[in-house]
Amino acid sequence: MISEPVTPEPMPSEPMPPEPMPPEPMTPEKLPRSRSAAVAIEVEALRLPGVTHAFFTRQGGVSEGLYASLNGGVGSSDDIVRVGENRRRMAAYLGVSAPHLLGLYQIHSPDVITVETPWRDGERPRADAMVTATPGIALGVSSADCGPLLFADPQAGVVGAAHAGWKGAFTGVAEATLAAMEKLGACREAMTAVLGPTISREAYEVGPEFRERFMEQDAGNAAHFTPSARDGHAMFDLPAYIVARLTRAGVGRIFDTSLCTYGDEKRFYSYRRTTHRGEGDYGRLIAAIALATR
């Protein structure tokens, strides 16, 4: 196993904005496909036959201001036309049509949806993970500190994506995703799981009630907390907690990108960083995975 967070980002709102004014004309672009491209992070462990994936950064899009620039958050207050263009670019990078880059109305739950066909444009079922055995569908989860997880069993032809904030991780969203993939024929021992950019322990201070909840679940969770400079508080290692649960669940290969959303403003959005600054909103990063069409 390679090892490679403050309240996690809240449940996205459902804004009903007025009809937006279209932005200035934009020349259609396709994000460059490169493992080292600034717009997306590809992990060698997921460069598998028949699988495409990306942990998109905030670079390479058309959004402005707080959202600059590759904001994929439909639930944000960003211009929806710009968000749509950003998502179109992401879909092109993954080799799927824009309507086939699916997203969820994330609710910090362990709920998983099995996807057989793309849903209607604009539809976002309430859940925090998706799995599929259908080629040409990209499963996308959004985050801005929480842990984005991508899963693949290329031999079975099954992939999954999960949004693992502390609450989802605590209630078992990763394990629920594994179980849903197994129902499609995957084997967890043959799976690869990768944790994308997530808020790190150094940036994730929590209160005593938070720590107590985890200690009641398992005394071994003490390993994921270290003392904070503030009395009664602690620093929580969300990535290590997620990796530990995946390990106990028996996943064959587990990788952590060890990238911190809070500390790397150039590449990543962060709900906590935005909160500390008193900013009104924040962009959302997209992590997505798909089975290539045959």
Image (cartoon, rainbow, N blue to C red):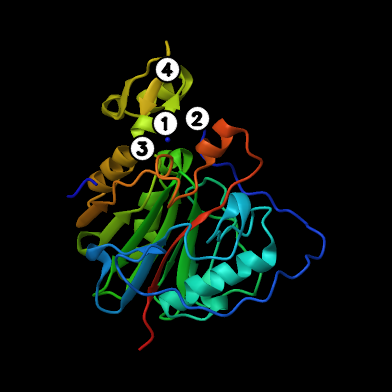
Q: Quadrant of residue 80?
A: bottom right
Q: Looking at this view, is 66 or 11 the one in front?
A: 66
Q: Looking at this view, is 201 or 130 the one in front?
A: 201
Q: Looking at this view, is 76 or 30 the one in front?
A: 30
Q: Earlier in the sequence, mark 3 or mark 2?
A: 2
Q: CA distance from mark 1 to mark 4?
A: 10 Å
**Residue at 44 percent of width and 17 percent of height:** 208
Q: Is residue 38 above or below residue 241?
A: below
Q: Earlier in the sequence, mark 4 or mark 3?
A: 3
Secondary structure type for disc 3: loop
- Which quadrant holds the C terminus? bottom left
Do labels 2 and 1 touch, CB within 8 Å?
Answer: yes
Q: CA distance from mark 1 to mark 3?
A: 6 Å
Q: Is residue 222 above or below residue 11?
A: above
Label 1 packing within 10 angstroms: few (<14), some (14-19), many (20+) = many
Q: Which residue is mark 4?
A: 233
* Figure disc tally: 4
Do labels 1 and 3 touch, CB within 8 Å?
Answer: yes
- Residue type, mark 1 in image: Tyr
- Residue type, mark 4 in image: His
Q: CA distance from mark 3 to mark 2?
A: 12 Å
